[in-house]
Image (cartoon, helix red, strand yellow):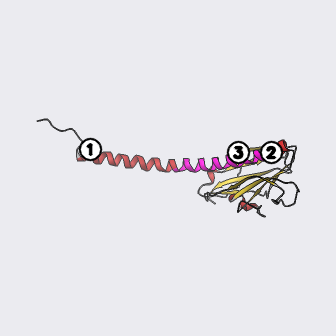
């Protein structure tokens, strides 16, 4: 008669304990990675839409506006609405503050359904002229609700170029701890 191969109860318990220890070490690191990637991908998405607005302003020889939007159909009057979403449209009548009118051409409406990030900025809108320059420079800071270490800034220069950074020129991102 041959003896069966397998694990003893003690070996099985040791293996399960080692697996539990390794999992408890790996899970927090994985959650940090997920949070960092969520903020980075959101910043890259907003940057892509800003670059789209600039390119369309140049290609179509028209003024293009990006404004925060809560419902995906009208520009919100305050800068805190960037966390909810934004609109990109050709602004044919150049209203102040910008407003999406029926004669304007909506290029993109983005609704942000992620409640894990906020956007801090003083910008109520971004306007690109047909030359591709912006009326003013500014910074939009994406802050994680759980950890401000993962924040990203989208910096827009006066000539209209936008870039993503982990820090601003003064080295601070405007996230005051977990928001």
> What element does badge 1 sit on?
helix
**Which quadrant holds the N terminus?**
top left
> What element does badge 3 sit on?
strand
* Residue 6 counted in the magenta span: no
Q: Residue furthest bottom?
A: 77
**Mark 3 or 2, nearer chain start:** 2
**Mark 1 or 2, nearer chain start:** 1
User: Would you say the residues marked 3 and 1 are in contact, meaning their CB atoms lie under 8 Å apart?
Assistant: no
> Which residues lie in the magenta part?
31-56
Q: Which residue is mark 2?
A: 56
User: Residues under labels 3 and 2: Cα distance?
Assistant: 24 Å
Nearer the camera: disc 3 or disc 2: 2
Nearer the camera: disc 1 or disc 2: 2
Q: Residues within 10 Å of mark 1 (few under 14, many from 20)?
A: few
Q: Which residue is mark 3?
A: 165
Q: Position of residue 40 (x, y in %)?
A: 64, 47
Out of 75 and 61, give the one closest to the viewer.
61
- Residue 48 seen in this snapshot: yes
Figure quadrant of residue 55 = top right
**Which quadrant holds the C terminus?**
bottom right
Q: Which residue is mark 1?
A: 11
- Residue 169 seen in this snapshot: no
Residue 84 higher or lower than 171, as above or below = below
At a point 75% along the width and 56% down the height, the residue shown is 121
User: Residues under labels 3 and 1: Cα distance?
Assistant: 50 Å
Q: Position of residue 47 (x, y in %)?
A: 72, 46
> What element does badge 2 sit on?
helix
Q: Position of residue 31 (x, y in %)?
A: 52, 50
């Amino acid at each position: 008669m041959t003896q069966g191969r397998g694990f003893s109860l003690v070996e099985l318990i040791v293996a399960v304990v080692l697996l539990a220890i390794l999992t408890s070490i790996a899970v927090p690191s994985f959650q940090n990675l997920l949070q960092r990637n969520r903020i980075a991908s959101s910043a890259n998405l907003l940057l892509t839409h800003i670059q789209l607005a600039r390119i369309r302003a140049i290609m179509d020889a028209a003024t293009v506006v990006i404004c925060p939007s809560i419902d995906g159909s009208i520009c919100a009057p305050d800068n805190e609405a960037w966390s909810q979403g934004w609109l990109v449209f050709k602004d044919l009548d150049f209203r102040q503050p910008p407003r999406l009118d029926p004669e304007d051409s909506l290029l993109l409406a983005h609704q942000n359904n992620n409640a894990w990030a906020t956007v801090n900025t003083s910008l109520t809108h971004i306007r690109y002229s047909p030359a591709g320059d912006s009326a003013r420079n500014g910074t939009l800071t994406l802050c994680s609700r759980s950890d401000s270490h993962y924040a990203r800034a989208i910096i827009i220069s006066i000539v209209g170029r936008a870039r993503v950074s982990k820090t601003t020129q003064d080295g601070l991102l405007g996230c005051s701890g977990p928001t």
